[in-house]
Amino acid sequence: MAAKALIHSVETCGALDGPGLRYVLFLRGCPFRCIFCHNPDTWTLSGATQKTASEVLEDILKYADFFRFSGGGVTLSGGEPLLQADFAAELFGLLRARGISTALDTCGYVDITDSVAECLRLTDLVMLDIKHLDRARHFEITGKPCDKVMRFLNYACENGNTVRIRIVVVPSLTDSPVYFEALAKYLTHYKNSIELVELLPYHDMGKAKWHALGLEYKLEDTPAPAEETLAKAEEIFGRYGFGTLRTKR
């Protein structure tokens, strides 16, 4: 029986989740509870729409011309898409057979099962969100340690995936030059696999969702990072040989 995805929502012409115009499929379920998450409504499985990979493909193919014109494709996001790795691998196999680019937006907090390995084999671009390099600070931000994320990064790079590192730049959490320096130095071990470092300036546009769900938003008074902070991050990562991209969600 074909695996059915638990789908939260779809963005049909996304421009912020990989190169070109993209069909972005947001799946439900996530192992993290990031304190700056802008999609807390994806955490649980309730309210999901269920579809098979073939059913999703039928909708995706309506936008194939946009992918060709823009150099885009399909991105699986969430939530955490690799919690539904059977579906992800099946969909990416169908897309690869039709020459459609695949991207995976993941937190990396998964075990490398056969389904996860197969999905990565069929992924053209892995966009890995590194919440924090420090184990204790990572736990503070997500509710989980970072060890499994770093093992995922190592596996993806060793197995030939092209990786884009995504960093949410949050004042007082992930915005110090010392942290940028430490992360850039760590990532040099994977320089041949990392295409660029994407900086996502913190914003509080998800705050209303937290309130609507009855959740405490711990970053209530946190401002957006200063321009000087983002420029410093670009300078530091550039010094270590990484290109950077700023994406404002």
Image (spheres, rainbow, N blue to C red):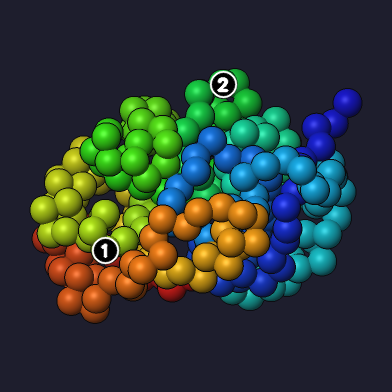
Q: Which three-letter amino acid code belongs to the residue tagged 2?
A: Thr
195 sits to left or right of 121 = left
Does 243 appear above or below 224?
Answer: above
Question: Would residue 71 be visible to someone looking at this image?
Answer: no
Label pair 1/2, CB-CB below 8 angstroms: no
Residue 183 is situated, as x and y percent measured from the top left of the image, at: 20, 47
Question: Residue 157 at what x, y percent from top left?
Answer: 36, 36
Q: Relative to the observer, which residue lies in front, 196 or 169?
A: 169
Query: To which residue does mark 2 refer?
Result: 113
Q: Nearer the viewer, residue 21 or 172?
A: 172
Q: Secondary structure at mark 2?
A: loop
Circle nearer the N terminus (1, 2): 2
Dot 1, how many residues are within 10 Å of its Cα: few (below 14), some (14-19), or many (20+)?
A: some
Could you tell whether 57 is left or right of 100 in the image? right
Classify the position of the N terminus by image quarter.
Answer: top right
The location of residue 48, given as percent across then percent down, is 79, 47
Q: Residue at x 51, y 23 (%)?
A: 112
How far is disc 1 from disc 2 in space, using C-alphas?
A: 36 Å
Query: Taking the image as drawn, is residue 214 in sight?
Result: yes
Q: Residue furthest top?
A: 114
* Relative image position of residue 95 (x, y in whole percent): 71, 48
Residue picked out by circle 1: 171
Query: Measured along the vertical axis of the image, is residue 43 above or below residue 1?
Result: below
Q: Amino acid at mark 1?
A: Pro
Quarter-wise, where is residue 29 in the image? top right
